Amino acid sequence: MSLCSLLAVPLAMAALVSAVVGLAVCLHDLLRRRVHLPSLHYRDSTLSARVLTKCGLRQRVFSPPFWLRSGHAQTLAASLLPRGDGSAELCFEREYLQMRDKGVVALDWLTGSAPKTRRKGTVLIVLPPVTGDAMTVASLCHLATRRGFKAVVFNRRGHGGSVLTTPRMQSSGDPTDLRQVVKYLRLRFPRNKLAAVAYGTGCGLLISYLGEFGSSAILSAGACVSPCYDTSERFSGPLKSVYDLVYLLKLKAILCSHAKALHGVVNVTQALQAWDFTTYEERVYCRMYTPAPGCTSTAPGVTPCATHCSSAVANTMEDYWERNNPIRDVDDIAVPVLCINSLDDPFYAGASIPYDLFNCCPNFLLVVTEKGGHCGFLEGFPLRSWADRLCLDYLEAVMEITTKGYSSTCSNGTRCHARSTI
């Protein structure tokens, strides 16, 4: 008897066992997905109860396919794989808006694909990650346009392939430019409501803006996908993963593209030699304001910029992180905010979620999933973002409820700090 015939039976048995085990794993995965619901964290109030009911959040299941059950797979798929939303056919029309200090920011307006925008629809400001651009959030813009929103992507100065006309880029928690953009949109669309959705590192800017300007923020509601709540906890230490390395390399690529504009303010050569976030922030963003010694030791021939920004000026790096921390003024946020986080987010691995914040503040709603990665939350075939649909459902629910008016009375009978219409 040949060796092949001797091995045929064991190999066939191994293949059969593997197939049975694989089928069992798939069935287990399917059954598990059917019963798994994201955890919700919020303070009881009339608004939260109505939003939960209208969005169906108590029964809203996130069901990623079995091959996207890993946080790494979700994160990579969100950035590499096409989605079934027609976003590849979309194009954006760029508008440059000049700031008070003569700098410019880029606004990308969605065009094409026959958008069905209502005349009085909500203007949706989309904030991509710091290293992203309009195409990074094209799927949300497409879906929002189909629902009647006017979608516009806000690119920080120097980001998203935009030009840099001043020797200054905004730090992560400086909402000065965003404030001017929101005011501009209010003047341009006086009869429309304004809302915002942010992703990843863009969430810090949105939360900073809502907290710093409080009841005068002009926005009616906001939503954050994969936010980081404490930037000092996450970015003040050494690189922790390959995601940190990729993120830092992308920041350096943006810096290199504006080396000429930043000459005399930032020593680009020194900045490119930084291999941790604290050193990079010190050698780049701290130099663009006028902070005192501690994060300002300039290299020969490098002069700090004379532009001031109250939210970014710092005496030490600890002060810098504190002044750029998204939740520094969180108690002043006066509009409903949705946050969506995944427990397997590899980019924010180790960063804590402030559950107490959501359990105490009536304007906040936190949705936490076991799976989803960083800005992933993909499910179905073709792949679609579960988080994108939830964000728009939430904003639509808030707009409808606040337009009709609601009583901001909590379940315990006390008055909640809430806001109705703008």
Image (cartoon, rainbow, N blue to C red):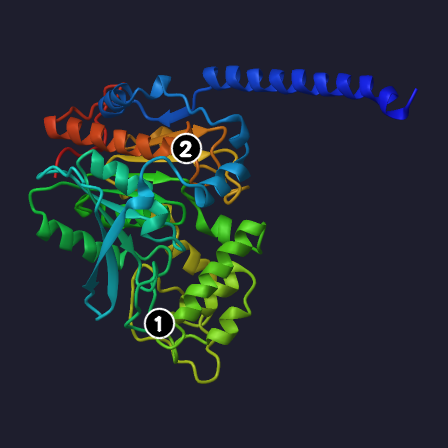
Rounded to the nearest whole Å, what is the CA distance between mark 2 and mark 1? 47 Å
Q: Amino acid at mark 2?
A: Leu
Position of 293 with respect to 43 (left or right) is right
Q: Residue at left 78%, top 21%?
A: 11
Residue 290 disc label: 1
Q: Amino acid at mark 1?
A: Thr
Q: Earlier in the sequence, mark 2 or mark 1?
A: 1
Q: Quadrant of the N terminus?
A: top right
Position of 370 with respect to 380 (left or right) is right
Residue 383 disc label: 2
Q: Residue furthest bottom?
A: 301
| Camera-side residue of 359 and 120 | 120
Picture coordinates of residue 325 (x, y %)?
39, 51
Picture coordinates of residue 69 (x, y %)?
53, 30
* Residue 203 to residue 414: above or below: below
* Residue 357 to residue 157: above or below: above
Residue 316 visible? The answer is no
